[in-house]
Image: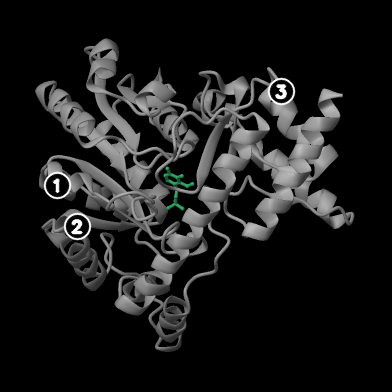
């Protein structure tokens, strides 16, 4: 019999929709995919070449649990060069994706019964990881007025004697919004005063369309920062991410990494060395501009169809849209849209409870041409449903 803790853990509803979309495609019905949370672009060539070279040179053994020293150094240099922030490479641990980093960080912070404050809507795995460690996720409703991000006032309202840490993502999944500098600073100060910890997921950091990307590492050495090669670097399938942690936690994190995964993939780590070099960064910046063009097309197109997107998302590749003009049940809406119009999107329930049945997420992880086709099919679907 499966363990009790599994009772609280939920699957991604979108997986069911994705499976159905694949089935429809296999039957010869094309689907426009706006549900997928990974770039459509493949891994940049210099990265793939470096991975192949590593395999050919026999670099197929374990690395140290904390990762290849040269990759930890390269990430430290990336923070210096791109963000002007000095980070000791010894505080950087290489993990199997941001997913591995999230599991590690929660493993060192969460005791059974500890509360972890997070936004609703937010990235669904976070609450499930907290359940896995027998903690209690405290899901705080966030609305457009606050850019769908937490604030110190909200933390004040929800923090209790059992609260241990706060998790946020900027830019966020599913809303694409960025936390304002002063809001983040105030939250950091709040958490410090309560002797808690702040975990910020910066996986979409370099996918920013307004202003310069920032890192919360600038706030001090007592913050936990999660990142990954998955999204901006186009390496989802390589399974490689990292965690920057306060010095005092590194020993325990290293020990946990040894036990949980021994090490991240070795060829992926060698490949990632090329991801941080100028030729690759050039390709990635071009892709970032392409994502921006897609957002600039899709945002007004959805608004003009009647979806409510009150805050312009500044990053990631998602639009979180209020669909209450059309439905009070976003899951059924997404299912019907797939079945009747061949457009796949993600229902709000995957991201939490707050107004989840009135929201859906559109991902612009497909070509402009496909997006235009998707919008046309969506418009026809809405017109048919109205009449
Ligand atoms: C906010 C956020 N964090 C973490 C992850 C996991 O990413 P990775 O592929 O690096 O494990 C995702 C993936 O969608 C995400 O959206």
Secondary structure of the residue carrying numbered label 3: loop
- Pointers 1 and 2 in contact (CB under 8 A)? yes
Secondary structure of the residue carrying numbered label 1: helix
Secondary structure of the residue carrying numbered label 2: helix
Label 1 near ligand 1 (CB < 8 Å)? no
What separation in Å lies between label 2 and label 3 (alpha carbons)? Answer: 43 Å
* Residue 122 visible: yes
The numbered mark, 2 or 3, whose residue comes first in the sequence reads 2
Q: Check disc 2 and report the residue beneath it.
A: 83
Label 3 near ligand 1 (CB < 8 Å)? no
Residue situated in front as seen by the camera: 67 or 64: 67
Residue sitting at the far right: 27
Q: Check disc 3 and report the residue beneath it.
A: 326
- Occupied quadrant, residue 239: bottom left
Residue sitting at the far bottom: 57
Question: Which labelled disc corresponds to residue 218?
Answer: 1
């Amino acid at each position: 019999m499966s363990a009790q803790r599994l009772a609280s853990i939920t699957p991604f509803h979108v997986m069911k929709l994705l499976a159905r979309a694949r089935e429809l495609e296999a039957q010869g019905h094309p689907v426009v995919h706006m549900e997928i949370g990974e770039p459509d672009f493949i891994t940049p060539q210099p990265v793939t070449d470096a991975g192949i070279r590593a395999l050919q040179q026999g670099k197929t053994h374990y690395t140290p649990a904390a990762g290849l020293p040269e990759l930890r150094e390269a990430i430290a240099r990336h923070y210096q060069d791109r963000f002007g922030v000095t980070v000791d490479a010894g505080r950087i641990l290489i993990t199997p994706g941001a997913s591995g980093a999230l599991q590690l960080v929660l493993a060192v912070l969460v005791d059974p019964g500890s509360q972890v404050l997070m936004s609703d809507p937010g990235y669904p795995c976070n609450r499930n990881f907290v359940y896995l460690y027998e903690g209690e996720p405290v899901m705080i409703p966030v609305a457009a007025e606050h850019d769908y991000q937490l604030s110190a006032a909200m933390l004040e309202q929800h923090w209790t004697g059992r609260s241990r840490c706060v998790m946020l993502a900027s830019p966020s999944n599913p809303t694409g919004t960025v936390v304002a500098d002063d809001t983040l600073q105030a939250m950091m100060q709040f958490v410090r005063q309560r002797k808690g910890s702040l975990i910020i997921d910066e996986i979409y950091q370099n996918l920013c369309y307004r202003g310069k990307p920032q890192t919360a590492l600038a706030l001090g050495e007592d913050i936990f920062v999660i990142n990954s090669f998955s999204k901006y670097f186009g390496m989802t399938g390589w399974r490689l991410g990292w965690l920057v942690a306060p010095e005092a936690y590194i020993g325990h994190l290293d020990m946990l990494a040894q036990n949980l995964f021994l090490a991240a993939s070795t060829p992926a780590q060698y490949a990632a060395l090329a991801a941080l070099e100028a030729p690759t960064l050039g390709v990635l910046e071009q892709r970032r501009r392409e994502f921006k063009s897609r957002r600039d097309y899709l945002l007004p197109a959805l608004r003009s169809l009647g979806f409510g997107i009150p805050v312009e998302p500044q990053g990631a590749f998602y639009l979180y849209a209020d669909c209450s003009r059309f439905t009070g049940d976003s899951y059924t809406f997404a299912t019907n849209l797939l079945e009747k119009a061949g457009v796949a999107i993600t229902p709000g329930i995957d991201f939490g409870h707050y107004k989840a049945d009135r929201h859906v997420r559109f991902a612009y992880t497909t070509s402009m041409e496909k997006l235009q086709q998707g919008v046309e099919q969506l418009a026809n679907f809405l017109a048919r449903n109205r009449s």
